[in-house]
Amino acid sequence: MSSHSISPNLRIALTGGIGSGKSYVAQLLRARGIEVFDCDASAKRLLRSSEPLMQSMRQLVGNHLYVDGRLQKQVLAAYLLASDENKQRINALVHPAVARDFEQSGYQWLESAIFFESGFDARVKIDKVVCVTAPLEVRIQRVMQRDALDRQKALGWIECQWPQERIRAMSHFEIVNDGVQDVSQQLNELLIQLTNA
């Protein structure tokens, strides 16, 4: 099923916490010929290529954030982890840039792990939100395997984000990616519902 059957004016956000399988669902969409805007990839690209953003970041963090024009990830990570205020300052620069990038992309679908937490829902016009969920234990195991983390660190990353139940309550649709239910079939049903939206 292609995106052509969905109204071209409909804008859809795909969200879900770490380990939910949100990126897997985005891959399934791409396999169906549906382009999905990746907010994380956009942020990384803009931090390396957008001169206005890079200049603002230098003013905030310091000139040592970029060496020979290259982002120093360890400097950024140290700044981010130093305090919640630092994280908020970075987000106040990066999130509007990513929102502008999405608006200019012309994509219908947006993928963001922190769609609600980041306030992105207030920055861009989105008509429907799809939340990908999975049981906590499944999420812990996925994060442990994917990132080679111990159980405590994996759980820590999960707990840094909003509770899955809160995200689900704010969403229009849910795809359960628990390793049991057929995700592809759920996606097909979702696309049919969106066609009729």
Image: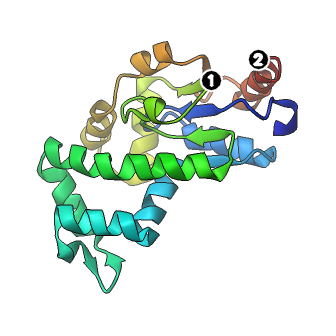
Mark pair 2, 1: CA separation:
9 Å
Q: Position of residue 10 (x, y in %)?
A: 71, 29
Pointer 2 with pointer 1, Cβ within 8 A:
yes
Q: Quadrant of residue 181?
A: top right
Residue furthest out toward the bottom = 68
Q: Which residue is mark 2?
A: 197
Label 1: which secondary element:
strand
Instruction: Identify the residue at image location x=81%, y=38%.
Output: 3
Q: Position of residue 99 (x, y in %)?
A: 49, 45
Indicate left or right for 149 with 105 as reference: left
Instruction: Identify the residue at image location x=52%, y=33%.
Output: 15
User: Would you place residue 101 above or below residue 71 in this image?
Assistant: above
Identified by mark 2, the residue type is Ala
Q: How are the colours assigned in the image?
A: rainbow
Q: Quadrant of the N terminus?
A: top right
Indicate left or right for 85 with 42 as reference: left
